[in-house]
């Protein structure tokens, strides 16, 4: 991957709806080589897809929490069961397995605190293998959806 590929990736991360003509202009290429590079980046997996970035409050998701989960390590199936259960909860919009403690970081979006409490009581508290859950409320997103560095 060279500097032009990285410029293409940066531009597409900022605006995935750019036409190939506009993208080529921004990165200093003609249309055909730019289009070829984009196709190569897609085929190689550097570009995994295109999507709309939705504003959570506009769609009624005004509350965001981070949930830290520490598991009881009973056997390898514990991890699999936990991850499958978390994947099935639509309000979990991001889940990351971590080194050290806690074991997982879950990013959760709900309409409000009451909805989060119900989700916590009815689903999170019953997740398989959980030893401890700790939540913190997101006050403000300072950096979000930033393009990866070049």
Image (spheres, helix red, strand yellow):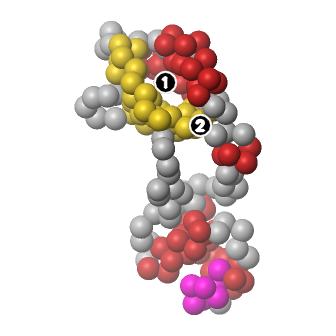
Q: Label 2: few (<14), some or many (≥20) within 10 Å?
A: some
What separation in Å lies between label 2 and label 1 (alpha carbons)? 23 Å
What predominant SS class does the magenta segment belong to? Answer: helix
Q: For this rendering, which residue is in front, 9 or 138?
A: 138
Q: Nearer the viewer, mark 2 or mark 1?
A: 2
What kind of element bears circle 2?
strand
Q: Which residues are magenta?
A: 23-29
Q: On the image, numbered disc 2 is attached to which residue?
A: 63
**Is residue 9 rendered to the left or right of residue 16?**
left
Q: For this rendering, which residue is in front, 5 or 73?
A: 73
Mark 2 touches mark 1? (CB < 8 Å): no
Along the polypeptide, which appears first: circle 2 or circle 1?
2
Q: On the image, numbered disc 1 is attached to which residue?
A: 83
> Picture coordinates of residue 42 (x, y %)?
60, 62
Quadrant of the image containing the N terminus: bottom left
Above or below 34: residue 52: above
> Picture coordinates of residue 126 (x, y %)?
51, 10
Above or below 94: residue 146: below
Residue found 69% across the figure and 83% down from its top? 22
Task: Evaluate whether residue 95 shows in this view.
Answer: no
Which residue is the extreme one toward the left?
A: 100
- Asked if the magenta segment contains residue 145, the reply would be no
**Is residue 125 rendered to the left or right of residue 70?**
right
Task: Evaluate whether residue 43 shows in this view.
Answer: yes
Residue found 33% across the figure and 9% down from its top? 74
Q: Which mark is residue 9?
A: none
**Is residue 66 rendered to the left or right of residue 71?**
right
């Amino acid at each position: 991957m060279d500097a032009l590929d990285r410029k293409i990736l940066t531009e597409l991360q900022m605006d995935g709806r750019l036409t190939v003509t506009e993208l080529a202009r921004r990165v200093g290429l003609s249309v055909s080589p730019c289009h070829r590079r984009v196709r190569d980046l897609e085929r190689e997996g550097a570009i995994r897809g295109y999507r709309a970035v939705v504003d959570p409050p506009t769609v009624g998701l005004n509350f965001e929490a981070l949930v830290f989960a520490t598991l009881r390590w009973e056997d390898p199936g514990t991890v699999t069961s936990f991850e499958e259960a978390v994947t099935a909860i639509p309000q979990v919009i991001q889940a990351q397995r971590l080194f050290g403690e806690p074991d997982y970081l879950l990013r959760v979006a709900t309409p409000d605190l009451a909805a989060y409490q119900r989700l916590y009581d009815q689903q999170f508290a019953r997740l398989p293998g959980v030893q401890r859950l700790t939540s913190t409320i997101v006050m403000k997103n300072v950096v979000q959806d930033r393009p990866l560095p070049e």
